[in-house]
Amino acid sequence: MSISKIKNAAKSLKTFQGIHFEQCLDNGETAEQMNKWLLEVSWEVANKVGGIYTVIRSKVPITKKEYGTIQLFTNMFSRHLCVVLFDIGSAAHRLDGWKVDFFQYAHIGIPYHDRESNDALIFGFCVFWFIGTFIEQVKRIKKSYVIAHFHEWLTGVGLVMIRLRNYDCGLIFTTHATLLGRYLCAGSADFYNNLSHFNLDKEAGDRQIYHRYCIERAAASCAHVFTTVSQITGIEAEYLLNKKPDILTPNGLNVQTFAALHEFQNLHAQNKEKLNAFIHILTPNGLNIRLYRRKPRSIWSLDPIIISHERISNFVQGHFLG
């Protein structure tokens, strides 16, 4: 698939939002026959503390429904068999050589003392090697179509190297919030009112993240399709990364299942309704329950739920046991 076709396919999603894609897709049968592959790449895809894990996990059910069997993801953390693990410690001895290679290709230098960037470089080259080998293997079967979707700047090294080495692979880069934007907001800057006035190189240099900023900006520029997760993040990226998103891809939360946008809140509301339904069966006056958090040994332990329980007990004893 050519670069222009990849971009046109991505942009068409904005044009035809009214189409019910479920009626047009065949659960991956055509993709399998055409040897099409989608690889999701993220530093923390299986790190349950991270927000990107939630985003990618929420994409899995609908992706599987539309495109068929999910073969693999790439990351460094996981106990799940569907994740390809990279032991970056085993490749640490290649760090200096890879820094030289990355500087020769991308003209971005990474300082010795920045451990997070060093880890990102090792991870990026591991992904770069893996995807290169993967493309060679699937091409042996027949002509292949491989798309790799990279999330956040920590995966940017792999994307940049794949593009600069001209691998036959469609590249998507998604930023969930720009790196420099995070630092500016953390510094209590009047961020959104001054987006067009920041001296980006100076701001990144003052915070000693210039090399990270360059990696993120290079990834956005090298990607065939650049996306962000919201309109405001798209505006932020346009100013700070000098690249307007090709398409907005809102975080894939399953709002139909979790209307409260949080599992605990949703279960709390459901269980409360079950309790109220039970109470309404037993009490003619329709007593409502309100649930509160209480300290384990608080003197105010007789909250409405306990009082309601006593009234239920008295009602049951008076009408059924007395």
Image (cartoon, grey):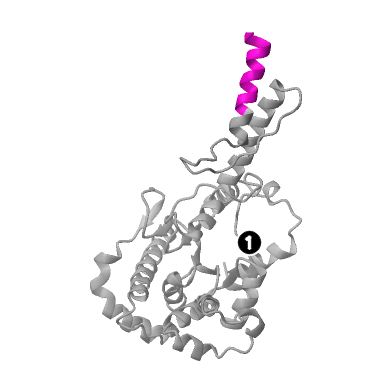
Q: Position of residue 196 (x, y in %)?
A: 64, 87
Q: Residue at the left extreme?
A: 93
Q: Is residue 157 left or right of residue 179?
A: left
**In this rendering, does residue 246 appear at all?**
no
Instruction: Say if 9 sits above or below 235 in the image.
Output: above
Residue 159 among magenta residues? no
Instruction: Say if 293 sits above or below 196 in the image.
Output: above
Quarter the C terminus occupies: top right
* Crowding near the residue tagged with mark 1, few <14, some 14–19, many ≥20 C-alpha atoms within 10 Å: few
Magenta segment, prevailing SS (helix, strand or loop): helix
Is label 1 in a helix, a strand or a loop? loop
Q: Write down the residue under mark 1.
A: 250
Residue at position x 60%, y 69% from top?
228
Give whichever of 176, 95 is nearer the camera: 176
**In this rendering, does residue 283 appear at all?**
yes
For badge 1, the amino acid type reads Pro
Give whichever of 271, 256 is nearer the camera: 271
Q: Which residues are magenta?
A: 309-322
The image quarter in which residue 312 lies: top right
Instruction: Say if 243 sits above or below 271 in the image.
Output: below
